[in-house]
């Protein structure tokens, strides 16, 4: 099993896979345009030319990112792919210097096994609710929120340092 960054050519398969499970009430739907706009957030696992699983790590702020749109096709379940994708997101968050990762899910037990802890939605910053108004369940969100603290954020570069500005 190889986890790779998603490519534009994967978007339509990811869209079908996500929305198949969304239609079953297991996750929220995603518009194809949203997948294209955020393709750099996504990782995939392919079975030949077929997308067998995907997940996104969406950065919300300097210290906060969300794991979202995690889905594994029926024929690929039970192989640890979902856990591997979440681990990949956590590793990328660490590489980016992000100290906190959260998710909103209908499968909290799975994320607890990945090290996440339940948290009341009201404890999440308002910034994370930016896309909620497009959700078909807004304002009656029934997803469960979980959080994973990775450690203190890396210090940000001092923007006032001389010689650091440039435009091209």
Image (cartoon, grey):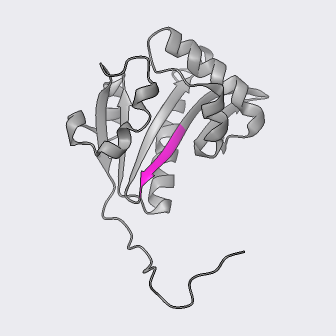
**Res. 48 visible in picture:** yes
Q: Is residue 119 visible?
A: no
Q: In the displayed orientation, state which residue is furthest to the bottom.
A: 162
Magenta segment range?
Answer: 56-61
Q: Is-magenta flag for residue 58?
A: yes
Q: Is 149 in the magenta?
A: no
Residue appearing at x 28%, y 46% in the figure: 125
Place of residue 59 in the rendered image (x, y in percent of width and height, measured from the top left)? 47, 50
Q: Residue at x 31, y 60 (%)?
A: 151
Q: Position of residue 14 (x, y in %)?
A: 65, 26
At 51% from the left and 91% from the top, the residue drawn is 162
In the image, is 34 to the left or to the right of 148? Answer: right
In the image, residue 57 sits, relative to residue 34, either above or below, namely: below
Q: Which of the 4 image quarters holds residue 156?
A: bottom left
Against 24, is 102 above or below?
A: below
Quarter-of-image position of residue 138: top left
Residue 101 or residue 45, whichever sits in front: 101
> What residue appears at the point 47 percent right and 21 percent down from the top-left corner?
28
Given residues 97 and 115, the one toward you in this image is 97
The image position of residue 41, as x and y in percent, is 58, 44
The C terminus: image quadrant: bottom right
Q: Is residue 101 above or below residue 141?
A: below
Magenta stretch secondary structure, dominant: strand
């Amino acid at each position: 099993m190889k986890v790779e960054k998603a490519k534009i050519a994967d978007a339509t398969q990811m869209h079908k896979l996500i929305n198949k499970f969304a239609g079953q009430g297991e996750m929220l739907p995603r518009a194809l345009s949203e997948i294209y706009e955020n393709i750099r957030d996504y990782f995939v696992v392919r079975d030949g030319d077929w997308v067998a699983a995907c997940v996104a790590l969406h950065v919300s702020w300097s210290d906060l990112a969300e794991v979202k749109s995690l889905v594994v096709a029926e024929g690929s379940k039970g192989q640890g792919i979902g856990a591997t994708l979440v681990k990949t997101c956590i590793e990328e968050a660490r590489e980016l210097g992000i100290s906190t990762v959260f998710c909103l899910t209908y499968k909290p037990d799975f994320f607890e096994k990945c090290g996440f802890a339940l948290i009341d939605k009201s404890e999440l910053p308002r910034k994370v609710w930016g896309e909620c108004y497009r959700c078909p369940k807004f304002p009656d969100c029934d997803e469960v929120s979980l959080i994973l603290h990775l450690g203190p954020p890396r210090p940000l570069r001092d923007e006032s340092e001389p010689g650091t500005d440039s435009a091209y």
